[in-house]
Image (spheres, helix red, strand yellow):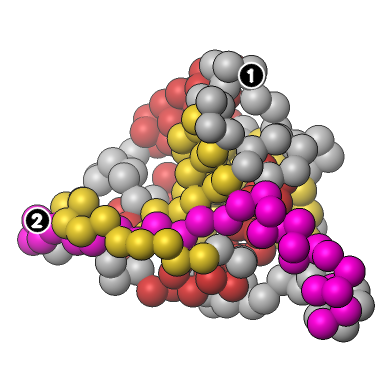
Amino acid sequence: MPSLRTPSPPLRSGGVMLRALRGGDVPAITEACQDEAIQRWTRVPAPYRESDARGWIAAMRSREKAGEALELAIADAHSGLLIGAIGIVTLNWRHRAGEIGCWVTPGIRGAGVGTTALRLLSRWSLGPLGLERVEVRIWEGNDASRMAAERAGFAHEGTLRGLVIDRLGGEVRRDVDIYGLLRTDVAAENAPERRAELGGGRVPIAVTRDRR
């Protein structure tokens, strides 16, 4: 498997930048991951400590070198400060497919940051990275992430029943919805006739709330 590199220059759109994670992000990651929603809809440790953030960054760098995954900071494009994280959390190079996971800090939810980040990473993955398919897996009840996926162009493909246990919901089993996006979907989105339908310019990035 080829090693992975952070997109250079960083991916940018609408005041959002996707850049490499760095040691200076540890305090912001640690603070964000105290959030109940992040702990509920992702698999971050609970409780979450600075050692978890440092270990996660180190592990991700090893996985990037091995070509297994890629994690990026979602940052404010002006200040560079971390406001979330997004990554290709699993990769299947044989089938050129990957799964994307994302979280954003509580203070910026509702501003479309999750949708923008998802659109940026998915289009890069289906373009320069060379994948043919990306997907997001959204737990039952995570309506904000479902909305973000739909507005980023992903199609609902089905439901895996009772796949996960809700740690903060009394060990209740929850369904997981699969949303997918193909390289051919993006090609159709960028076709001249489709662009004309949207007003002739670039395909707009919809504003919504933020996954995972």
Asked whether residue 77 is in view, the answer is no
**Residue shown at 61% from the left, 52% from the top:** 182
Going from the N terminus, do you reach mark 1 or mark 2 first? 1
Q: Is residue 196 magenta?
A: yes
Across and down, in percent, residue 155 comes to: 51, 65
**Residue shown at 40% from the left, 58% from the top:** 178
Find the magenta span and give its range: 170-197
- The foreground one among 180 and 39 is 180
Across and down, in percent, residue 121 comes to: 65, 49
**Residue shown at 34% from the left, 51% from the top:** 42
Q: Mark 1 highlights which residue?
A: 3
Across and down, in percent, residue 150 comes to: 53, 71
Q: Quadrant of the C terminus?
A: bottom left
| Other-residue count near label 2 (Cα within 10 Å), few / some / many at <14 / 14–19 / ≥20 | few
Taking the image as shown, residue 166 lies to the left or right of residue 31, namely left
Asked whether residue 21 is in view, the answer is yes
- The foreground one among 112 and 186 is 186
Taking the image as shown, residue 145 lies to the left or right of residue 3, namely left
Taking the image as shown, residue 26 lies to the left or right of residue 193, namely left
| Other-residue count near label 1 (Cα within 10 Å), few / some / many at <14 / 14–19 / ≥20 | few
Q: Which quarter of the picture shows residue 97?
A: top right
**Structural distance between the alpha carbons of marks 1 and 2:** 37 Å
Q: How many marks?
A: 2
**Residue shown at 67% from the left, 50% from the top:** 183
Which of discs 1 and 2 lies nearer the camera? The answer is 1
Q: Mark 2 highlights which residue?
A: 171
Q: Secondary structure at mark 2?
A: loop
Across and down, in percent, residue 116 comes to: 66, 63
